[in-house]
Amino acid sequence: MTSVEALEAVLSVPPAVVGVVLATGLGFFLGWRAWQRCPHCGWLVRRVTEGWRRCRVCGRQYRRGLRVR
């Protein structure tokens, strides 16, 4: 496939599909910045900006730097 054919393939995509892809990508990006997984139970919880938070499911505290095990 040449570069001209690749460009034609990209430009032939309907604008609605491009909009859905961009909105999905933006949603994942913003969601990744605002949410994280609880390192104890894996539940989706709000990201910590400073200090500690408590998970509503398992009740244990977590902080920003902890990773899911």
Image: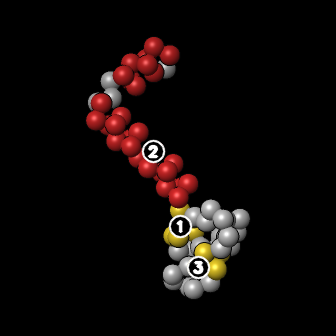
Amino acid on which disc 1 is placed: Arg
Q: Tell me which label, 2 or 3, sits earlier in the chain.
A: 2
Amino acid on which disc 3 is placed: Arg
The answer to whether residue 24 shows anywhere in this view is: yes
Residue 31: image location, x then y, percent: 49, 55
Q: Is the residue 60 above or below the residue 47 in the image?
A: below
The residue at the point 28 percent across, 35 percent down is: 16
Q: Quadrant of residue 9?
A: top left
**What element does badge 1 sit on?**
strand
> Rounded to the nearest whole Å, what is the CA distance between mark 2 and mark 1?
18 Å
| Label 1 sits on residue | 46
> Rounded to the nearest whole Å, what is the CA distance between mark 2 and mark 3?
27 Å
Q: Tell me which label, 2 or 1, sits earlier in the chain.
A: 2
Q: Is the residue 58 above or below the residue 8 in the image?
A: below
> What quarter of the picture does the C terminus occupy?
bottom right
> Rounded to the nearest whole Å, what is the CA distance between mark 3 and mark 1?
10 Å
Q: Is the residue 44 above or below the residue 20 in the image?
A: below
Residue 27: image location, x then y, percent: 44, 50
Q: Is the residue 4 above or below the residue 53 in the image?
A: above
Residue 63: image location, x then y, percent: 67, 70
The residue at the point 34 percent across, 42 percent down is: 20
Front-lying residue, 30 or 17: 30
Label of residue 26 in the image: 2
| Label 3 sits on residue | 54
Q: Tell me which label, 3 or 1, sits earlier in the chain.
A: 1
**What element does badge 3 sit on?**
strand
